[in-house]
Image (cartoon, coloured by chain):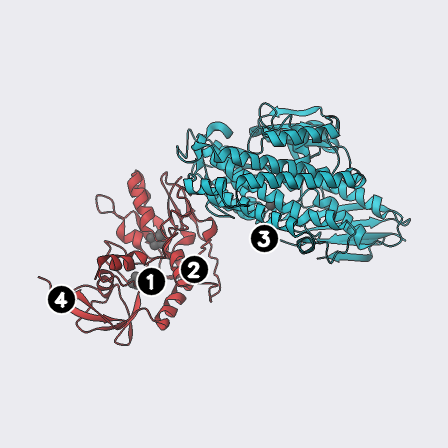
Amino acid sequence: MSKKITIEPVTRVEGHGKVTIKFDDAGNVEQSRLHIVEFRGFERFVQGRPYWEAPVLVQRLCGICPVSHHLAAAKALDVIVGAGTGNGLTPTGEKMRRLMHYGQFFQSHVLHFFHLVSPDLLFGVDGDPAIRNVIGVAMKHKDLAVMGVMMRKFGQEIIAATAGKKIHGTGAIPGGINKHLSIAERDSFLLGADPLNIDKMIEWAQAALDFLKDYQKKNTDFIDNFSKYDSNYLSLVRKDGALDLYHGVLRAVDANGKKVLNDVDYQEYDKYISEEVRSWSYMKFPYIIDQGKEKGWYRVGPLARLNTADFIPTPLAQKEFEIYKAYTNGKPNNMCMHNHWARLIECLHAAEMIKVLLNDPDLLSGELVTKGTKTNRGVGLIEAPRGTLFHHYEINENDQITKANLIVSTTNNNEPMNRSVNNVAKSYMNGKDTITEGMMNAVEVAIRAYDPCLSCATHALGKMPLEVTLLDANDNLIDRKRS
Amino acid sequence: MSEIIKIVIDGKEIEATKGQTILQAAVNNGIYIPTLCAFDGIKPKASCRLCTVKVNGRAMTACTTPATEGMEIENNTAGINEIRKAIIEAIFVEGNHFCPSCEKSGNCELQALGYRFMMMVPRFPYSFPQRPIDATNPKLLLDTNRCILCLRCVRGLKDENGKSLFAIKHRGVHAEIVMDHEVCANISDEMAQKAMNTCPVGVIIKKEKGFDEAIGTRKFDKQPIGHEIENKFNQGGN
Ligand code: SF4
Ligand code: FES
Ligand code: NI
């Protein structure tokens, strides 16, 4: 008997996607694919619009990670208005944007860990689906659930103070930012009543990380071996090799840590990165041109970033980085589930950075915007919580956008997610007579490790669900899971 | 000296100067009557009908109707406000008003009216018209998707020779605001800003200004539209 499975909708990822697993006559996985229902409407939608609308307009393509789009677009427009890249802004402009970004990072990583991942860890991949969800966590592990909610709230308040609103704000504008931080806002973040102050947040970020490290020690086999495979890794790094989530040069390393993209200027990203179209997927497959389509695919996100960066420029996260790196003897980490470990180290780093910034007087006063000689093309890259995000705009002499190209984090991880699905499907389902709910969830767990934002990758308006389907060799439906 | 007369709005007697419109009398007494097409310094022409009130039981536009001795006017009543809400909704569906990405958001009178009159979902179907953007002027951009044809720009914006910066092309449903490119060719920054401020919505845009006003500092972020009139009355100590 041969069969094909589709997992759709994949639960607890952001957006809509569909996994199809096809079995051969021997009952082994023949092929598995993650399909994303894609809608590239936004790239067309912004054409003809005045360029300064882009940061506010494009963030709408995702209700989950709007701040990353807002900032990537603003960075691209900095180039267009002649403010240069990254450090071309005034200190106030750059630091307010960074604060917004770290606030977003913090709340996004927290949301992912507490709401989307902790159920699998606390109840097991094959735990009872009725309690294997955030409600289950809230009931059984109240303290953890409270931490998750309050940490997320803190991050959202940082976003509101810098962007004007918790979601879909307007703070970043071409060449800078439109507001300062008020003393009252700063003091509420520094000195707010427990738990809503930055010291508590750092403490809790450390606690969440300790929880995960402890879990890894007790479940080493699962965390280390669940879908592990070699790949290239890509991210921005600061010029000196430090982890920098807001700005830097583009670096990629291979499975052995050898640099395959050597700290290049991302304004020319299209010299180094290309996107392959495959007939069965609407979502493109980016790859490093030098390495070719076969070998050039790469991973982005927390795992990738801690593989490309040489160090983390805040003390607590650096200490954790050293422990994390020692675990793989300094070699690139290829363990899919270690994304969660890396993510929580970044979460700690984001909290530390927020504290550094809050103590910086440049946030309270100083020039907000800087401009120079206008150009007609700008590229903005940023490390979004889910990985490198590319925005590229071109304008005409009337200030209207003529071209937009976006490569979102989840698209960068398209090939890796497909590999993970394939790995897990094979190891959990090959030769099995019955396919259980737990096995199907295992496939989803692999996808969730990347924290994909399918809403964003598909440029769909709003949130959509996801589904898994099993089909036999004759494409007859065996089972379907949707939630 | 001008003659003082008495009129009654919603049961409250107020003083007006003979020759004033109902709208002017109301504003002077801290009573808000919503408006769109009426604008400071422009002779009203009653094209939006938002200022509709009932005078001795009959619907009239407050911006054009002169106040006369003893008039009984209904303004802030459930029935009239419902008519106004319907007018606001009709204006919304006629154009393409996407507030989330519009830089006039927070300073837009139509949006502010939507909030004040608690518009939720318009009762009329959206018409999604196809309308052009004119971005060819170096300082001004015209996005007619948002035009409500109030004509404030046509009637209120003139250069030093008295020539209008904007004109109306076609009539009826095809009416469209266009820029006079000759008149606007060397427009100053101040004039460009004035043009943007004259437009109640986000059609006339001063280029490259974008979202430079932070959320929380825009005109209608803290106070609903009309509050400046109602506040003036309170502070007046009458
Ligand atoms: S452009 Fe603005 S001011 Fe002119 S008619 Fe249209 S809405 Fe009114
Ligand atoms: S304000 Fe009176 S009709 Fe428009
Ligand atoms: Ni997204």
Residue indicated by mark 2: B92
In the image, what residue type sits under mark 2?
Answer: Phe
Indicate the chain on which mark 2 is placed: B
Q: Report whether mark 4 lies on the same chain as mark 1.
A: yes
| Cβ atoms under marks 2 and 1 closer than 8 Å | no
Residue beneath disc 3: A462
Chain letter matching colour red: B
Q: Nearer the viewer, mark 1 or mark 3?
A: 3
Quarter location, residue B64: bottom left
Ligand 2 quarter of the rendering: bottom left
Real-space CA distance between mark 4 and mark 3, rounded to the nearest whole angstrom: 59 Å
Q: CA distance from mark 4 to mark 1?
A: 29 Å
Name above or below for residue B199 compared with residue A208.
Answer: below
Q: Nearer the viewer, mark 2 or mark 3?
A: 3
Q: How far from the left and from the top, in percent, is residue A341?
A: 69, 38
Q: In the rendered structure, the residue with mark 3 lies on which chain?
A: A
